[in-house]
């Protein structure tokens, strides 16, 4: 399904009419141009040149690695699979310049020249190679900053700076604030992800292997593996205890206990990041998942502008400590479980992160456009987001509990081991773990749950 057809179909759970993508993107581009112009003025650049990236050849081979366009370029132009495109922005120009790469090549099919809601906002030029692309740019680029991976011919372009840190920070910081266009893209990405998750859950119930579940997800979402924003985590049974499990075994297990699936989709360069956990036949584990889902939803209700993300993370540890006690896994009271570090044995990651052009979107620890960092709390060193929540942020909220042998064995040999009910751990470790993750758009009074809305709609 093409991006334009997808955009026409999916309008978001709250929309009552067809989305005007032309107007949304035009407003987004104006907002992005204003932000960028301010950052350039502060950093003394008069132009910005973004490169979509280059294909890379496998060592001693003639094939290329799967190509991905980098995030700063995608924010301007949702070209997702065409290398050697350029966007040139000069605040003095009426429109940004888009140089689209269409090589003269009879070995491969060249990408079609875009003619859709976003391409109409650019001064569009066609280049067959980097030399013809350079000819479309101003002769003097000495006050232009280049953002992207450097390539051999870049020295001849004569740009003033390559990936200057101060400009990158000034552009990364406001990426947390999503435009209306970006929010709509994230809604569509969530909708596609929910379709994939529904199909994956059905495949799990039918006895599929991890690999077959992954195929069911991609088929229902209508996305190739290289189009997904990240490698999907499809973890059966104890594999769920590996936080970023990547294998996708092709043979189903002899006995089926559980599925943890962490998988998302991408639309126009924007990602969804969704996790669900399912029991196969065990009623008790299904009840534990239901209790954990209730815990996760209570945490979602804490999300609103003005709240410190680190505080929500701290509350998630306390809530999980209560769940651990109620589930018979630990003997200590929740406050003691958290203070002693025992909760981190079962829950060793952060509560979530910014989401957008990247799954772990940029700027999560930036304190301002000057690039200064908001340090992670010493007791929570894994946090990817340390900023206070503001309206326009989109975050994931993903508490989890796992039976990780490495962490459990470390705890067993120390004082924490006395507070763990090891017989209960032995009963449950075959399930691997539980994680539930939603994508939330922060508002002044609360949040829009993009994930739950999408699941309700499919």
Image (cartoon, rainbow, N blue to C red):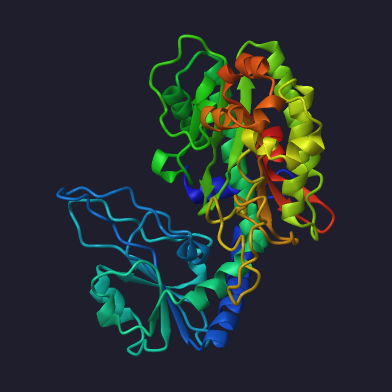
**Relative to 83, is 276 above or below?**
above
Tell me which residue sits at (76%, 57%) in the image. Answer: 308
Which of 37 and 39 lies nearest the eye of the viewer?
39
- Asked where in the image residue 430 lies, by quadrant, the reply is top right
177 displayed left or right of 443: left
Which residue shows up at 65% across the image and 19% down it?
Answer: 422
Residue 219 at x, y percent in the picture: 46, 31
- Measuring from the top left, give residue 8's x and y in whole percent: 59, 48
Residue 15 in view, yes or no? no
Question: Residue 305: x percent and y percent?
Answer: 79, 59
Quadrant of the frame with the C terminus: top right
Q: Residue 106 at x, y = what percent?
A: 18, 54
Q: How many marks?
A: 0
The residue at the point 63 percent across, 35 percent down is 345
Nearest the viewer among 421 and 442 is 421
- Locate residue 98: give its quadrant: bottom left
Q: Say if 350 sits above or below 165 in the image.
A: above
- State the residue in front, 187 or 334: 334
Q: Is residue 146 above or below residue 92?
A: above
* Residue pictured at 57% horizontal, 39% vertical: 192
Task: In the rendered view, tell whether residue 202 sits above or below residue 265.
Answer: above
User: Left of 256 or right of it: where is 183?
Assistant: right
Residue 416 visible in the current orientation: yes
Residue at the far right: name it: 445
Q: Quadrant of residue 413?
A: top right
């Amino acid at each position: 399904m093409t991006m334009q057809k997808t955009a026409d179909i999916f309008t978001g759970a709250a929309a009552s009419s067809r989305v005007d993508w032309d107007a949304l993107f035009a407003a987004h581009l104006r907002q992005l141009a204003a932000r960028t112009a301010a950052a350039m003025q502060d950093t003394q650049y008069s132009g910005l040149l973004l490169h979509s990236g280059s294909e890379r050849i496998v060592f001693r081979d003639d094939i290329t690695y799967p190509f991905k366009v980098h995030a700063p370029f995608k924010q301007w132009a949702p070209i997702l699979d065409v290398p050697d495109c350029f966007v040139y922005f000069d605040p003095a120009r009426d429109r940004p310049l888009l140089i689209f790469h269409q090589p003269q090549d009879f070995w491969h099919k060249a990408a079609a020249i875009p003619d859709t809601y976003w391409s109409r906002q650019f001064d569009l030029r066609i280049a067959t190679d980097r030399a013809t692309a350079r000819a479309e740019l101003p002769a003097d680029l000495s006050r232009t900053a280049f953002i992207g991976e450097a390539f051999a011919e870049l020295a001849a372009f004569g740009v003033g700076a390559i990936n200057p840190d101060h400009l990158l920070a000034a552009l990364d910081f406001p990426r947390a604030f999503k435009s209306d266009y970006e929010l709509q893209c994230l809604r569509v990405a969530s909708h596609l992800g929910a379709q994939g998750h529904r199909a994956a859950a059905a495949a799990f119930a039918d006895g599929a292997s991890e690999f077959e579940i992954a195929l069911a997800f991609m088929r229902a979402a209508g996305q190739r593996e290289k189009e997904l924003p990240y490698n999907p985590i499809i973890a059966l049974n104890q594999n769920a205890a590996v936080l970023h499990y990547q294998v996708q075994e092709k043979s189903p297990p002899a006995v089926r206990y559980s599925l943890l699936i962490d998988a998302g989709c991408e639309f126009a360069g924007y990602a969804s990041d969704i996790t669900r956990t399912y029991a196969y036949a065990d009623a008790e584990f299904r009840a534990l998942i239901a209790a954990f889902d209730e815990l996760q939803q209570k945490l979602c209700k804490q999300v609103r502008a003005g709240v410190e993300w680190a505080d929500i993370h701290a509350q998630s540890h306390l809530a999980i400590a209560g769940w651990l006690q109620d589930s018979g896994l630990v003997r200590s009271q929740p406050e003691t479980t958290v203070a002693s570090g025992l909760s981190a044995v079962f829950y060793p990651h952060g509560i979530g992160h910014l989401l957008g052009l990247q799954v772990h979107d940029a700027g999560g620890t930036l304190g301002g456009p000057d690039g200064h960092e908001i340090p992670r709390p010493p007791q929570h060193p894994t946090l990817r987001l340390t900023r206070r929540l503001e309206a326009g942020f989109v975050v994931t909220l993903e508490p989890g509990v796992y039976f990780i042998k490495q962490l459990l064995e470390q705890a067993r040999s120390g004082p924490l081991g006395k507070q763990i009910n090891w017989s209960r751990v032995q009963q449950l470790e075959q399930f691997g773990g539980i994680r539930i993750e939603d994508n939330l758009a922060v508002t002044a009074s609360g949040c829009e749950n993009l994930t739950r809305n999408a699941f309700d709609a499919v």
